[in-house]
Image (tube, rainbow, N blue to C red):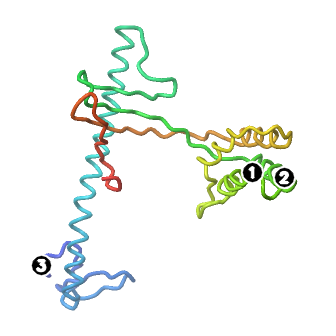
Amino acid sequence: MTDTVQHPAAIDVAGTPYLRDAKGSLVPLASVKAADLLMDETVRDILSQAREISKLIASFKASTFEAVGSLQALIAQNYGATLGGKKGNITLATFDGCEKVQVQVADLIEFGPELQAAKLLIDECLTEWATDSKIELRALINRVFQVDKEGHINRAELFMLLRVEIADARWVRAMDAIRDSIRVIGSRTYVRFYERPAPDASWRAVTIDMAAA
């Protein structure tokens, strides 16, 4: 249990240690419940470790990108060839094919006002089509335009909708409007790690993200 004299967050006032509570008030350390002190100690210990791990991961990520970049530069210099795709995607593998590192660059996109015009055209089509026709398509459209709590359109379903080919001129204009609405506002780079016991075995992700571990 926390030593009430040596508590790291204690504030000394005229020789008496105090702790500041969630409301900002100073509470004499001696009057804080033992359970609250134990919880405080546990959380501080966990967060201290979390900060160190966060720094370690940030350092590892930076060194990984530096190593991949150095390899790309070396190959470009020695062989006059570019290692990786146009967008920066690259996969590196060990000689035995049992370990690999993937660097992937994903576009960050948002949708402009053309998307609302597309929705109006799609609604016109749905109104005229028989209510019992294209049921699966109606379900897909509903999923696309069902905005989530953050106000985001379901992008995966939207791109699936773009692959639906219908001859109706309004539908064609709607799909064009959706394409025109897409704005690339940046990119985010991800690095992923995989391993397998043998070249013909399935890949297993080496996870670093705690949520995926």
User: Above or below — where is 5 with respect to 209?
Assistant: below
User: Above or below — where is 54 with respect to 41?
Assistant: above
- For mark 3, give the secondary structure: loop
Q: Amino acid at mark 3?
A: Asp
* Residue hosting label 3: 3
Q: Work out which quarter of the rendered image holds the N terminus and state it.
A: bottom left
Q: Is the C-beta separation of discs 2 and 1 under 8 Å?
A: yes
Q: Nearer the viewer, residue 24 or 74?
A: 74
Q: Which mark is residue 129?
A: 2
Residue shown at the point (63%, 43%) measured from the top left = 160
**Which callout, 3 or 2, points at the residue further toward the start of the chain?**
3
- Residue 71: x and y in percent read 32, 21
Crowding at mark 2 (Cα within 10 Å: few <14, some 14-19, many 20+): few
- Residue 169: x and y in percent read 86, 39
Separation (CA) of disc 2 from disc 1? 8 Å
When asked about the image quadrant of residue 107, the answer is top right
* Residue hosting label 1: 134
**Which numbered disc, 3 or 2, marks the residue closer to the eye?**
2
Residue shown at the point (70%, 40%) measured from the top left = 164
